[in-house]
Amino acid sequence: MNKLQYENTNNIPVFKCNLCGHCSGILEATSYTNIKNRGCCWYFPKYNLVDIKNIITIGKKNFIYVLLNMKNTVINKYNIEVKGTFDEEKYLEFIKGNPNSIEDNFDPKLFFKVCAFSRPDGCHLDFSLRPHPCNLYLCRTVVSCCGEVYKNYSRERKDYYAYCNYFDESIRQILTEKKVNLQSDPFKAIEIIEDFQMPPFGGGNFESIEFFPHNYGKKVG
């Protein structure tokens, strides 16, 4: 029996599933990287202005400075992206040898990607330091196994994304008015983000969902 739970701590909602990290038979978890139990950690984290605001609010501003100084970080005007690794050579070899092996419109490039914070024992970051796409992602297998009862979780995810989009744009407008962004003056931008008054996401309280991991996605290779 597996369990999906929802938590919202310090304005940071998280879907926690105990199948994660034990999912080698699932399509999304297929890994041809050096971390075989990588799970779905093929996403290259992108911190938007709301993610940055939440991290500052919990007293972890120094973590933002760490991100800014990482050699694999791309600092955009209004977000910070941390690039992971992508083995393009192995990917091209795979596509050449397996032209018809991919199902369900799944991008096979993800088999060859790994997040910069991924380790053999899981994510190197606490949930509070991850951007919201990481904390609210679930593979299609888990969603399918949960069935109809997942609809409240799905609605909560959509509502939080809408909340993030709205206040990300609000912070962006203030930065634009002050002619500051994360590229031109990251320290000033962070100061403005810190001072921004952002109401918390209300969120709901949902019971955990217990499910059996039937209907695994097909693993390639």
Image (cartoon, rainbow, N blue to C red):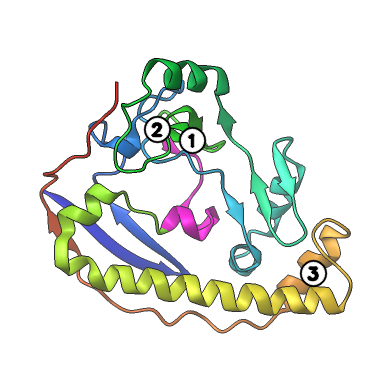
25, above or below 192, in the image: above
* Near-viewer residue (99 or 70): 99
Is residue 114 rendered magenta in the image?
no
Count up the numbered dots.
Answer: 3
Residue linked to disc 1: 118
Is residue 125 rendered magenta in the image?
yes
Q: Is residue 11 visible?
A: no
Residue count near mark 1 (Cα–Cα under 10 Å), binned few <14, some 14–19, many ≥20: some
Q: Amino acid at mark 1?
A: Ser
Residue linked to disc 3: 191
Q: How far is disc 2 from disc 1 in space, using C-alphas?
A: 7 Å
Circle 3 sits in a helix, a strand or a loop, which is it? helix
The spot of residue 89 in percent (x, y) is: 56, 17
Q: Give residue 52's quadrant in the image.
A: bottom right
Q: How far is disc 2 from disc 3 in space, using C-alphas?
A: 35 Å
Residue count near mark 3 (Cα–Cα under 10 Å), binned few <14, some 14–19, many ≥20: few
Residue linked to disc 2: 38
* Near-viewer residue (197 or 100): 100
Q: Is residue 36 visible?
A: yes
Q: Amino acid at mark 2?
A: Arg
98, above or below 192, in the image: above
Q: Are marks 2 and 1 in contact (CB under 8 Å)?
A: yes
Residue under the point 55% across and 23% down: 87
10, above or below 210, in the image: below
The spot of residue 51 in percent (x, y) is: 59, 63
* Near-viewer residue (172 or 13): 172
Range shown magenta? 121-135
The spot of residue 102 in percent (x, y) is: 33, 32
The spot of residue 198 in percent (x, y) is: 61, 81
Residue under the point 34% across and 39% down: 28
Q: How far is disc 3 from disc 1 in space, using C-alphas?
A: 29 Å
